[in-house]
Image: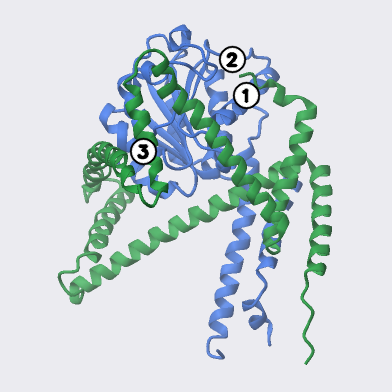
Chain colours: A green, B blue
């Protein structure tokens, strides 16, 4: 499909209006929940669902079912029937029918993932923690390896519950908790960075259309003020 | 009620407002703060530098508009690098929202190349977008054994056998390099788990900041040779790729706002803790 038409000035202006209106309607939730935010939210859900249906039909059902069957490979209908059986999950009486295709999916997926996960996340990761505790001439690498080895052992020991965590074991597991807390902190920091990045992305898009964004922002503020006044509950007299 | 008490019950909308200002003002005033590229991002760039012209690089774009600010700048910088060094990207997508973003990135790079006075890259000759394929790990496994059977047609509906840039490509091992741009599942984790070890692939990833802590162990274990995490990773990559040009990437511009946003959060955390501990006895 040729997408060059997306670069025409008219399309860019129209997309700027739509983008600014929907972004600021969603941001209006930060002031308080309101019908305009709900409108944008429902629109997003509806458009996403519609887009998903079209994509799945064109990319899954047509090439994997319709085309093969039309080309004489009738046995593909078996997979189509399995797909239809999955929909029985919605029925209270006949939901048991959906267990058959589900069993097939779970079996196939488990077969693929158990070995793959064991190789990549278990064996390779264990191998990566077996580090030399002395790297000649490189004190930073030595310290880094000590941290990896000791951190892994202390973290694992924290989850060893067959012995009361007191004495020397208690000290090591306490250090294990610190390692875990630091990793949670790092994850949280990255998450904050990710969320701010998303906000930056929206603002960058809005600032590409400063006039449109300002007009939309002022309209939404005015509408929110009117809505707040109209829906304000009267203060009960003492 | 003193200032600290008031701070503890501060309406959160003031925090939102300050955060918005911390982001908007640096974007408007073009305030720039220095930053240094991370070693894990440099590793991606250095690996690209070793490739001979004509090498085909597999690029899996597994993201959607939700993570565009973090990952699209990386995709644009990567395509710009590949086209300016006569390397040919073969693009696949495991996320349904990705193909339009890929097309948008290619259009942006084409415009940049035009400004440089370079010819526009030709579809099917210099690159190919194979489009979206449903199936996640099953698609990855299928690509490992039979790339042409997995993608019999490209995004425009052209049969794979009629696409010159795909000549000689049979499976994942046909590529010298594989760069994965990922916003979640299916993404970096699944590529590493499902095919990296099995086919011994040279795999690098650009992922969202949320995913980065989960991917760092793969970097440590050499399952990934390079990693660009979040907007910072994209900005690092842009800095390396656009060095010596007039381009300033979107992630680089965003990083200045990012720094001010973080500053606001740090200040609020410190003030919040001071207020909490100072008024603890009173409560």
Q: Can you tell which quarter of the image residue A68 is in?
A: top left
Write down the residue under mark 3. Answer: A85
Write down the residue under mark 1. Answer: B109
Q: Is residue A147 left or right of residue B160?
A: left
Q: Position of residue A196 (x, y in %)?
A: 59, 52
Marks 2 and 1: in contact by CB < 8 Å? yes
SS of the residue at dot 1?
Answer: helix
Q: Position of residue B190 (x, y in %)?
A: 36, 38
Q: Residue at the location (55% across, 25% down)?
A: B79
Quadrant showing the N terminus of chain A: top right
Quadrant showing the C terminus of chain A: bottom right
N-terminal of the pair, mark 1 or mark 2, is 1
Q: Is residue A207 above or below residue B109?
A: below
Q: Residue at the location (64% across, 51% down)?
A: A41
Query: Disc 3: which chain?
Result: A
Pick out the residue farthest to the front. Answer: A93
- Same subunit, tags 1 and 3: no
Write down the residue under mark 2. Answer: B121
Q: Is residue A63 left or right of residue A140?
A: right
Q: Is residue A78 left or right of residue B162?
A: left
Q: Can you tell which quarter of the image residue B70 is in?
A: top right
- Same subunit, tags 3 and 2: no
Viewer-side label of 1, 3: 3
> How far apart in space, not on screen, are marks 1 and 2 (Cα)?
9 Å
> How far apart in space, not on screen, are marks 3 and 2 (Cα)?
46 Å
Query: Disc 1: which chain?
Result: B
Query: Disc 2: which chain?
Result: B
Q: Nearer the viewer, residue A70 or A8?
A: A70
């Amino acid at each position: 499909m040729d997408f060059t038409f997306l670069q025409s000035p008219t399309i860019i202006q129209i997309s700027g209006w739509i983008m600014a209106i929907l972004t600021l309607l969603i941001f209006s939730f930060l002031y308080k929940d309101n019908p305009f935010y709900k409108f944008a939210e429902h629109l997003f859900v509806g458009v996403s669902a519609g887009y998903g249906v079209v994509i799945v039909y064109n990319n899954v059902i047509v090439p994997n079912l319709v085309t093969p069957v039309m080309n004489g490979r009738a046995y593909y209908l078996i997979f189509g029937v399995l797909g239809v059986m999955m929909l029985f999950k919605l029925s209270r009486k006949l939901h048991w029918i959906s267990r058959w295709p589900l069993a097939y999916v779970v079996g196939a997926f488990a077969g693929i993932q158990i070995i793959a996960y064991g190789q990549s996340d278990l064996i390779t990761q264990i191998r990566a923690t077996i580090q030399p505790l002395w790297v000649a001439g490189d004190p930073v690498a030595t310290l880094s390896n000590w941290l990896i080895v000791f951190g892994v052992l202390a973290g694992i020991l924290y989850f060893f519950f067959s012995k009361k965590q007191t004495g020397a074991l208690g000290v090591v597991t306490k250090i294990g908790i610190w390692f875990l807390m630091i990793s949670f902190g790092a994850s949280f920091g990255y998450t904050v960075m990710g969320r701010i990045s998303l906000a930056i992305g929206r603002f960058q898009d809005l600032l590409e259309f400063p006039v449109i964004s300002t007009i939309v922002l002022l309209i939404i503020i005015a509408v929110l003020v009117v809505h707040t006044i109209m829906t304000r509950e009267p203060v009960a007299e003492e | 009620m003193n200032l600290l008490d008031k701070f503890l019950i501060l309406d959160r909308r003031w925090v939102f407002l300050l955060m918005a200002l911390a982001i908007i003002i640096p974007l408007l005033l073009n305030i720039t703060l220095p930053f240094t590229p991370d070693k894990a991002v440099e590793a991606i760039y250095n690996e690209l530098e070793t490739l001979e012209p004509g090498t085909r690089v597999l690029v899996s774009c597994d993201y959607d508009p939700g993570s565009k600010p973090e990952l699209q700048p990386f995709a644009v910088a990567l395509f710009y690098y590949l086209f300016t060094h006569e390397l040919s990207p073969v693009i696949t997508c495991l996320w349904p929202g990705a193909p339009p973003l890929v097309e948008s990135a290619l259009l942006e790079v084409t415009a940049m190349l035009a400004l440089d006075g370079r010819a526009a890259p030709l579809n099917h000759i210099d690159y190919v977008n194979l489009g979206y394929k449903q199936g996640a790990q099953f698609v990855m496994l299928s690509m490992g054994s039979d790339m042409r059977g997995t993608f019999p047609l490209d995004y425009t509906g052209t049969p794979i056998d009629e696409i010159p840039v795909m000549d000689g490509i049979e499976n994942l091992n046909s590529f010298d390099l594989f760069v994965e741009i990922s916003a979640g599942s299916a993404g970096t984790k699944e590529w590493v788990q499902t095919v990296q070890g099995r086919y011994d692939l040279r795999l690098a990833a650009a992922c969202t900041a949320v995913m980065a802590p989960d991917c760092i162990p793969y970097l440590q274990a050499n399952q990934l040779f390079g990693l660009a995490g979040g907007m910072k990773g994209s900005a690092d990559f842009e800095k390396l790729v656009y060095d010596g040009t007039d381009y300033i990437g979107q992630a680089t511009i965003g990083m200045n706002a990012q720094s001010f946003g973080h500053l606001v959060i740090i200040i609020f955390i410190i003030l919040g803790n001071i207020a909490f501990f100072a008024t603890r006895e009173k409560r």
